[in-house]
Amino acid sequence: MKKTHRNTIFVENAKILSHDAFDAEQYILRVEAPECAKHALAGSFVHIQCDPQLLMRRPISIMRASKTRGWVDLLYKIEGNGTKLLATRQVGEKISLLGPIGNPFVPHMKRNRPLLIGGGVGIPPMIFLADSLREIKDAYQPLVLMGSEIPFPFEASSSNITVDGINNDVSAAMPLLEEWNIASRLVSMQDFVGCHKGYVTDLARIWLENLSNEQRNEVEIFACGPYPMLEAVAALAKEFKLPCQVSLEEFMACAVGGCAGCVVEVQTANGPAMKRVCVDGPVFDAASVF
């Protein structure tokens, strides 16, 4: 039976439609969750019951959502007992899902060159945001940069989309984004073929430095990933005087704002305040957090 929380968060007994394994214990889980799919926005996440024997749920970012077909895609990596149990769940089984939760990324039309930066399990929100931007035809020219120190959860392809300011030798891209005609480039320290060797912020800097002042004034940065990466992204945005939104990751118990177990300090007009990552976030202005 479906229930709502504040008329925005839904509890659904979601059917597993597919569950695909990738290198380095990464999985993409597709579940049938019509209400979540209908209301999800880029930056939303779900709180999922990994297994009936585990009462504590796990927060997982939404990678894609089909409003018309009613499915949601989730990318996760085995990190502990919860996700280890989740990886054993089979197609056809039902899984309790609470979502969509959280405030989304908010692109601004005047900044029509969005730079999307995802690191590791922070990649999914960037894919969702890119998908959202492509629905607004010709309004945005996004560039998606993704970094990983383990194999990417997809087979990289050589991009057919030229990115001015980035060396042609850096050609590795995500095939799905290529299908959407959205430019992407991959970054790693692991010598993966076609990837820029370094940090994802290194490649972001190269791209920003090669833009004209007029072009740079059209850039807005969106990022999700490990805390050190987000800290570096925030510093880059400050250096180039660019607006930047970041999605934070924190341990959560309830994920609906009741337990206050995921609070972070955020700078506001009235001074520092403690905000809940689950319902006050997970997306925040980078300058207010870092």
Image (cartoon, grey):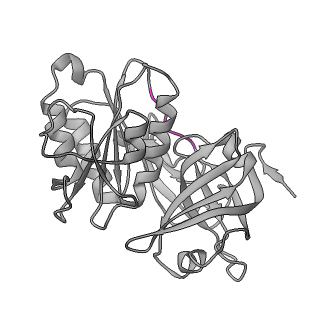
127 on left or right of 217: right
Residue at screen point 31% across, 54% down: 156
138 on left or right of 252: left
Residue 217 in view here? yes
For residue 52, above or below residue 187: below
For residue 267, above or below residue 242: below
Give how far across and how far down residue 18 sits, in percent. Answer: 61, 63
Q: Range of the magenta residues? A: 103-107
Give how far across and how far down residue 62 sits, in percent. Answer: 55, 52
Residue at screen point 17% across, 25% down: 211
- The quadrant in which the N terminus is found is bottom right
For residue 171, above or below residue 20: above
Residue at screen point 53% across, 47% down: 281
Residue at screen point 19% across, 66% down: 190
**Viewer-side residue, 266 vs 186:** 186
- Furthest toward the right, the residue is 1
Decide whether residue 241 is among the magenta residues. Answer: no
Residue 255 in view here? no
Q: Main secondary structure of the magenta part?
A: loop
Report the label total. 0
